[in-house]
Structure formats: C-alpha cells, structure tokens
Image (cartoon, rainbow, N blue to C red):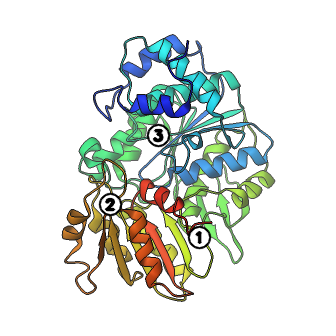
Amino acid sequence: MARFDTLEGWLDWQTGLHPKRMELGLERVAAVWARLGPASFTLPIISVGGTNGKGSSVAMIEAMVLAAGYRCASYTSPHLRRYNERVRLGGEPVSDAALCEAFERVDQARDEISLTYFEFGTLAALDIFSRAGPDLAVLEVGLGGRLDAVNLLDADVSVVTTIGLDHTDWLGETLDAIAIEKAGIFRAGRPAILGQRDAPEALRREAVRIGARPLQLGYEFDRASTGEGWIWKGPAGERLALPIPALRGPFQLDNASAAIAALTSLRDRLPIPVNAIRLGLRRARLAGRFQVLPGPVTWILDVAHNGEAAQALASNLRAFACPGRVRAVLAVLSDKVPESIVDPLLPHVSDWYLARSADARAMPVESLAERLSARLQSAEPGRFPDVAQAIDAALAASNPGDCLLLLGSFTTVAEAMAHPAVT
C-alpha cells in the first residue's frame, strides 16, 4: 500500500522527512540509488550547472533535441506553478501518477535513509527516466555541483554556464572557491563546457586537474553577431548561421553557444542537424525569465535573485524600452544580497514596492527596506506584507503604457503568476 495517494501528500511529507532543508553530499542518495536504479544508466546525459543561465541552457538543449525528432528527458528546479514542471519527457511535464509511483519506489528503496526534498525528487526523476528510455537526459544541477544530488551520475557532457557570488554560505565566498565546487560535475576524459568567456581561471584549471576536456566560450568555441542573426564557431572549425534565440537578452547567445557545444560533443551518439538547432532556438521558452505579458500595463516576470542575474535583467530592460514608468515589486529570500539586485536596476525603475513572499525563507519586508534605504532614499518604497498587496498597489498607481516588473525569487514570480490580474 502506497504511503500517499496524491502528489500533494507526498510533497508535504517530503518537506519534513529530513532534519535539514538542505544537506549537500552524495552518500545517502548513492546508497538509495544503488538499491533503486539500474546497474547502468546507458542513455547519454548532459548535466548543466552554474550560477545563472542553467534553466535557459536546459530549455534550449531540450528544444533542439526535440526539433531533431528525439525524445528528451529534462530535470530542472525549482518550479513555478506545478511540481511536475521539474520532470519532463518529450517536452511535457510527467503526470501526478508517474511522480507518485516513482516516489513510492524511492520510499521503498531508501528504507530508513533520510532524504531531503531535493534528493527525493532527484532520485524519483532519475527513476522515471531510467524506465522511460529517452534518447537524452538533461539534468540541471540544484546547488553547487560536486556534492549536489544530480552529480550522482557521471554525465557524458557537463556544462557550467556562469560563475557568480551566490549561495556563499554553502559554496565559499570567492569566485574561485565557487568555481571549484561547480567544476565537480566534470568527468575525466569527457567534455567540460565553460559557457562564460571571463570565467574564473579556477574553473578551467579544475577541469584540467580532473582530466576533463575543457571547451570554453571565446577559446575552443565562440560566437559572432551578424545583421539578422549570429554565427556559432565550433571547436573543429564549424560555422553555423543561426537565428536569434526566442529567449530574450544578448546574454542568451552565450547560453545558446554552450548548449550547441554540448550537443555537438555528443554528435557521434546523437547527431543534431543544423535545421533542428535553428528551429530549437526559435522554439525554446522558459517561464519567469524576462517573460513579458502584454496589456494596458505590461507585466515583466523575472526570477532574478542575485547581482549577475539583475545585470542581465537591466540589459533586457534597456533594450525593451518601456514607454511609461517601470514599477518593481521585489521580494527576496533571507540568504540573498538585495543591494546587488537593486543596484543595476536603479536607472530603469521609477518606483519600488517591497514585499515578503510566502516562502518560509523570505526576508522580512522591514529588513529588506532597511537594507535598501540608502539606495532608494530619493523615492520612499512601499512596504507590503505580501506580494499580492504590493502588486495591487503598483497596479493602482499605473497608467496604460506603464510596466510592472516582478522579481527577486522563484516564489515571487510564482505568486505574481497566481495574481487575478494575470490572464
């Protein structure tokens, strides 16, 4: 008899199963996988780590693989509206029933081993993929790399998109320290894709130490813009004329370049025609990453929750050129540095509405306001107990042509998506 018969029941129970919300390390998940998983995981695996750009890279890899006619499995986190978004087969979220059955198998295999929410979900996703037999699995690393549950399996190709200062309590307080943790997903003798032109030297150095084959943007592969599109330049001298990705922002060309480098590294096992690459770039979508919802007041949803992501968001706002005023609703988690998020956006945002999201880890709005007081002193920001009330106030002050920016965390964007004004 299954422990629970609904997805909600399983997820609620998992949040309290382990005494800590997060505990890095592979011993417990490896022990459970040894009981649960197949003797060998034969399908090709691309793992994607980094500070920002992971979700975009996974979305583009998935779209290109699907456009080529292959069946792609994708695992990402966190989700925005439904947990099922995390586990996709053929581009579609798996069903509640499939997740519940996988959770039951993980529960039976773990016996008395305690698992975190993320570990339980990762094992369930891998179990689903091993049974479904897709042509490729793309796995997004949750936090760090070396000790993240996704690193349980040896990826055939590993991608590190960017390195920035985030999760410093867990990964270290310098870019080099964080780079070494992220490089833990690299494997000896296998391609290690570095998707950042100015990545910390420690990232490539660690790839070489591990014995991986580093391929870095600006070195082994590169890109160049043209009038209507761009050119991808491959390690073997290939040159592909490509369209601008559907995902907004000039930085998406870096993510696309890394995604293409990863797939071309697997071409002997999974050849992707250039037309599928072009079609995938046009088709790739990702909710909550400069997602624009047009209307009398334009909504802009972005999960930007660190300084690097905020800089990318500022670049997008500059290119978007909202015709009216831009009002921002900001709510962040307690472990974030809100100053680094606000600073790049100051030239683009006229009014700020600070709130606390529903996440248990959310920063109290009083603390958020205190930390930002010096930066926002020219216009006293509004303070609200929740995201919905902040949105209501921002909408009431807006006129046709204005823009409403929602940012700060996945929770903030998820709450914005649930607002009645979003259609």
Query: In the image, residue 56 lies at what x, y percent?
Result: 56, 54
Q: From mark 3 to mark 2, how far is it between C-alphas?
A: 27 Å
Provide the residue designation for mark 1.
292
Q: Is residue 91 left or right of residue 111?
A: right
On the image, the x and y values in percent for residue 269 come to 72, 32
Q: Earlier in the sequence, mark 3 or mark 2?
A: 3
Counting the numbered discs, the total is 3
Residue at screen point 70% across, 44% down = 91
Q: Disc 1 on helix, strand or loop?
A: strand
Q: Earlier in the sequence, mark 3 or mark 1?
A: 3
Number of other residues with Cα within 10 Å of mark 2, as a class: few under 14, some 14 to 19, many 20 or more: many
Q: Amino acid at mark 3?
A: Val
Closest to the observer, 319 or 83: 83
Q: Nearer the viewer, residue 198 or 24?
A: 24
The reply to whether discs 3 and 1 touch (Cβ–Cβ < 8 Å) is: no
Quarter of the image with the C terminus in it: bottom right
For this view, does 374 lie left or right of residue 44? left
Give the CA separation, mark 2 to mark 1. Answer: 23 Å
Q: Residue at x 35, y 46 (%)?
A: 179
Query: Which residue position holds label 3?
Result: 141
